[in-house]
Amino acid sequence: MDGLHTVAIVGLGSRGKDTYAPIVAGMNGRAKIVAIADIDEKKVQEVRELYSVAEENCFDSAEALLAAGKLADVMFVCTQDKQHVPQAIEALKQGYDVVLEKPISPSTEQCRELLAVANECNGNLIVCHVLRYTPFFGKLYELLRENSIGDIVTIQGIENVGYYHMAHSFVRGNWRQEDETSPMILAKCCHDMDMLLWLTGKHCKRVSSYGSLFHFRPENAPEGATDRCMDGCAAKADCPYDAEKIYVTNEGTGVACGKEGWPVNILTMHPTVESIYEAIKTGPYGRCVYRCDNDVVDNQVLAMEMDDGSTITYTMSGFTKNISRQMKLMGTKGEIVADMGRNTITITPHGKPSEVIDVKKLATDFSGHGGGDRRMVKEFFDLLDTGVMSERLTTLGRSIESHMLALAAEYSRKHDGAPVTIADFR
């Protein structure tokens, strides 16, 4: 039923505060933020003032907000990975519709528990696999449904994490330790696991995986490296991971070059040259990448056998110039090379000339995960208004399948690449 949807957001980090809150607030009276929670008082205060949230509906934790009873129609759960399931379960039981940031949980038991509760409750729940909603992957999905290359036999996929993203998020940042959050293949790559299953419409039968923390270790520190980049490090000039380069002087990411969004806004809410220098001199993002407490892998490969005998290989690497995704899909009637970084899809039928699709001509909004963030939120509210689930909106069960695949791959990696049968692992 059409109408104003009231929204609570728990977790006011990069996703809750900087992504979803502006999208919800900009929906032309369709949705309104009425309750918020975060452990950072400054973030709560800023969001409260920006969106005119009543002070009595502002809380210092998701648990405190949930303890106050149902305050809105919809809850966006944007907290840390291991907090997601308990908070989503309580929200569902209170009657909220839930938008759940990925990953669901690094625990297979918690994934199953959430699915059981969701099946018992009447609320809608979607997981934020935002790549499904991009013009790029939407077009690729359409081409595959049109049987443009016949039956898919083999796929090669690669996620280029980006050297600075690797250093920022997975060496210095919040996702650096598996025990605190999730393994890398889940935290970063469950998007890709979901995408491979969604695009093909297939199920993974078994998986093998190899990977390691190859580079960001103390023994690889260059001569003269100090514990912090700004403490007179003798290796600073030649180190691409130097915090001053990434957060201050880099043309693509540095605050001195006019960049005020991610990643610099993770270091301080309102980045300036002065505030960023202070952050890298004293905070976690100024630590030497070879002397952090990180343990997640910086490279990983997967080999998947699908239920119909087709195969997929997938590579995650933290050692790339750009943050991008690429796929090569090989079918019985042709092949597709899809490059999200360039926003091009090249179709080559066997024995015929290639056709290049410029995805940039198919849409105007590519902000936020290639245009996926805003479209996902819109389609979720469309679901609430119409009761009709689009092909892109992922069911919890389908999302959990991608998580089981990622966690099975991680189990394989930790057991010398031993093949893991998904049905047994579940």
Image (cartoon, rainbow, N blue to C red):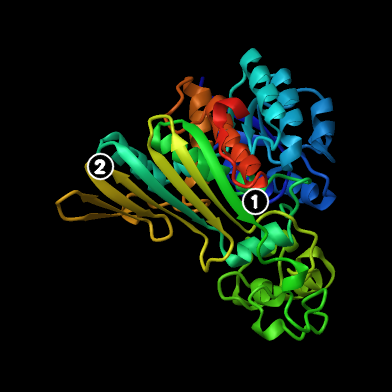
Q: Is residue 417 above or below residue 310?
A: below
134 lies left or right of 268:
left
89 lies left or right of 25:
right
Q: Is residue 98 above or below residue 79?
A: above
> In which quadrant will I find the C terminus?
top right
Name the foreground residue: 155 vs 163.
155
Name the foreground residue: 379 vs 227.
227
Q: Amino acid at mark 2?
A: Ile
Q: Amino acid at mark 1?
A: Asp
Q: Position of residue 131 (x, y in %)?
A: 49, 44
Query: What residue is rendered at 38% in x and 33% in y?
Result: 309
Answer whether residue 263 is visible to the viewer in this image.
Answer: no
- Residue 149, which numbered label? 2
Q: Position of residue 166 (x, y in %)?
A: 63, 61
- Residue 165, which numbered label? none
Q: Report the residue marked by disc 1.
A: 18
Name the foreground residue: 51 vs 303.
303
Q: Quadrant of residue 51?
A: top right
Q: Position of residue 57 (x, y in %)?
A: 79, 34
Badge 2 element: loop
Q: Is residue 348 above or below residue 163?
A: above
Label 1 neighbourhood size at 10 Å, few (<14), some (14-19), many (20+)? some
Q: CA distance from mark 1 to mark 2?
A: 39 Å
Q: Quadrant of residue 186?
A: top right
